[in-house]
Amino acid sequence: QVQLVESGGGLVQAGGSLRLSCAASGGTFSNYAMGWFRQAPGKEREFVAAISGSGGPTAYIDSVKGRFTISRDNAKNTLYLQMNNLKPEDTAVYYCATQRPFRGLGKTHPNDYEYWGQGTQVTVSS
């Protein structure tokens, strides 16, 4: 069983930056491709970004390309999401998750992910 704990959310003005972290325990972190999702009030959970277990290949939704960067430190069992030039439409609860094995990188449906954190709130004011 893998446990995931997100941190780093908060309130920021449009154009600002935040870095989210996701600390993992209970498994071999480097074995898992990882993803970030977000969910705004009244909306479905949305894929944001993914990264391979090695930290090499990455994938992003179009709306965050060039603004968000996913990365990981396998020695620290930690996943990151650097978010720059934030916009009000980025406001949501952000979740990290482990991808189910053998699915290939960049799966965007929540059902392709197995273990989830509790989420961290990101609010961007205009």
Image (tube, rainbow, N blue to C red):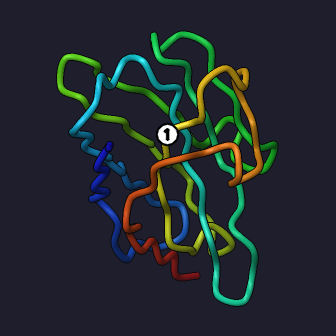
Q: Nearer the viewer, residue 4 or 100?
A: 100
The location of residue 14, given as percent across then percent down, is 54, 69
Number of on-image labels: 1
Compared across the picture, whether 12 is left or right of 48 comes to left
Q: State which quadrant residue 37 falls in.
A: bottom right
Amino acid type at image mark 1: Thr
Q: Which quarter of the image is occupied by the N terminus?
A: top left
Residue found at the far bottom of this picture: 42
The location of residue 124, given as percent across then percent down, is 51, 75
Residue placed under numbered mark 1 in the picture: 98
Q: Which quarter of the image is occupied by the C terminus?
A: bottom right
> Is 41 above or below relative to 51?
below
SS class of the residue under badge 1? strand
What crowding class fits label 1: few (fewer than 14 Cα within 10 Å), some (14-19), or many (20 or more)? many
Residue found at the far right of this picture: 62
Q: Nearer the viewer, residue 118 or 43?
A: 118
The location of residue 27, given as percent across then percent down, is 28, 30
Q: Which residue lies at the image location 72% right of the left edge and 30% below the top edge?
A: 106
